[in-house]
Amino acid sequence: MIIEKVRDIGATSLTITHDMSSARTISDKIHMLHKGEIIWEGNKDTIESTDNPFVVQFINGLSEGPIN
């Protein structure tokens, strides 16, 4: 529904979520924040190929990594 409404009126939408499945579905670009800083940004299709350890830990739901 969000996607259709945004496209219908030609708007830009900002969605804040921890749900990567939703982010991949409704987004064109993704920015990842950690402690108030953008640590990764890019096309939703490139997030899986990042070597950023924070992003890798988050998108894979790993308990081990730089995020405490």
Image: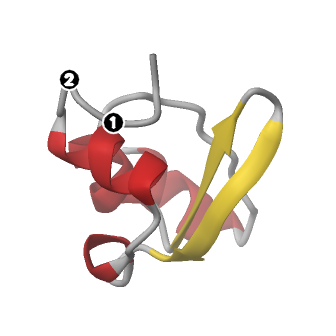
In the image, farthest residue toward the right: 36
Q: Position of residue 60 (x, y in %)?
A: 17, 45
Q: Position of residue 20 (x, y in %)?
A: 30, 44
Residue nearest the observer in this picture, 28 or 60: 60
Residue drawn at 67 percent across, 41 percent down: 33
> Label 2 is placed on what type of residue?
Ser
Q: Position of residue 57 (x, y in %)?
A: 30, 43
| Crowding at mark 1 (Cα within 10 Å: few <14, some 14-19, many 20+) | few
Residue nearest the observer in this picture, 12 or 7: 12
In this rendering, the answer to whether 32 lies above or below 15 is: below
| Crowding at mark 2 (Cα within 10 Å: few <14, some 14-19, many 20+) | few
Q: Is residue 39 left or right of residue 64?
A: right
Question: How far, Cα to Cα, is label 1 from label 2?
Answer: 7 Å
In this rendering, the answer to whether 11 lies above or below 14 is: below
Label 2: state its secondary structure. Answer: loop
Residue nearest the observer in this picture, 67 or 15: 67
Name the residue that disc number 2 marks: 63
Q: Position of residue 7 (x, y in %)?
A: 56, 70
Q: Which mark is residue 65?
A: 1
Q: Is residue 13 left or right of residue 45?
A: right
